[in-house]
Amino acid sequence: MSILRVDNLTKTYSGAGQDLTVLHSVSFELAAGDTFAIVGPSGSGKTTLLGLCAGLDRATSGSVWLNGILLDQLSEDQRAAVRNQHVGFIFQNFQLLPTLTALENVLVPLELRGRRGAAQVALTLLDRVGLADRAHHYPAQLSGGEQQRVSLARAFANRPAVLFADEPTGNLDPNTSERVVNLLFELNREAGTTLVLVTHDLELAARTRRILRLRGGEVVAAGAATP
Ligand SMILES: Nc1ncnc2c1ncn2[C@@H]1O[C@H](COP(=O)(O)OP(=O)(O)OP(=O)(O)O)[C@@H](O)[C@H]1O
Ligand SMILES: [Mg+2]
């Protein structure tokens, strides 16, 4: 069974009296445990596609199956429940909650699930991303790269079936970037987490098994990430 199946997905934004179609009939399928990169120029629809796959937003037409669940007709609340159960998401701009510390941000998805020992799990995750000594800092007191890593810890808290990451290395220096990328692939190997990454970093894209190339909202190439 595929973990993610996208069928003829189209997204049109309407506003200001003008419709803008930013994704045109995108289709692909991913097996559980796969690693996948979505690449393409700025504005080509990468973030939009990621959000539709993760159930953050609804398509204009077409279908998304996530872990066997058809997302198309689900309500906002139902999609939120599916996300908490199956999805981890690292946003391009992190979206940490500013009034919560690093530790509290990582605790949010754990507490939503009523996980026992949540505090210990959250601390272990922060340690894993190298931020044990920043647990009580607020996002505004963290560097961009540190916020990125808190976001990774939060995204992985519930050991999701699929981890979506939008430019996971976009704000990181080469050393930290290497560390975050290694961590992502470790999670893939150890927990079987399917990785779906949006990236401009061709080295990172080359480490995934498959690549989808978008231009102007259309798939221009899809296939194995040949070195
Ligand atoms: N809420 C919205 N309303 C209208 N247009 C939008 C909206 N969100 C995105 N767009 C448009 O959709 C297109 C695709 O945006 P998207 O964020 O998916 O691009 P991207 O490939 O992730 O770009 P980048 O590499 O710069 O992050 C852009 O032209 C953008 O202006
Ligand atoms: Mg984007």
Image (cartoon, helix red, strand yellow):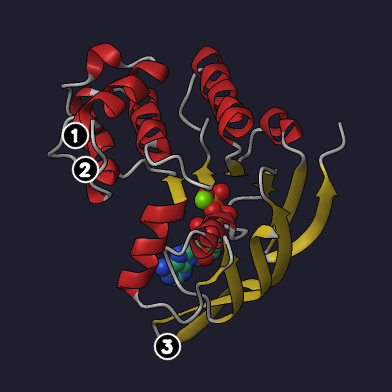
Which corner quadrant of the image does residue 144 belong to? top left
Farthest-out residue, left:
99
Q: Which residue is drawn at 65% across and 33% down?
A: 201
Label 1 SS: helix
Label 2 SS: loop
Residue type, numbered disc 3: Gly
Query: 31 left or right of 133?
Result: right
| Residue 198 at least partly seen | no
> Does residue 88 lie above or below 15 as drawn?
above
**Residue 97 appears anywhere in the view:** yes
Picture residue at 81% right of the left edge, 54% below the top: 222
Provide the residue designation for mark 2. Answer: 97
For the residues marked 3 and 1, what is the alpha-carbon distance in whole angstroms? 42 Å
Residue situated furthest front in the rendering: 116
Q: Where is residue 170 in the image (x, y as percent from the top left)?
A: 51, 33
For disc 2, the neighbor class at 10 Å (few under 14, some 14 to 19, many from 20) is some
**Residue identified by numbered label 1:** 104
Q: Is mark 3 within 8 Å of ligand 1?
A: no
Q: Nearer the viewer, mark 2 or mark 1?
A: 1
Instruction: In this rendered view, identify the residue nearer to me: 153 or 218.
Output: 153
Residue 17: which disc? 3
User: Dot 3 lies on which element?
Assistant: loop
Callout 2 touching callout 1 (CB < 8 Å): yes
**On screen, residue 177 above or below 79:** above
- Earlier in the chain: of badge 2 and badge 1, it is 2
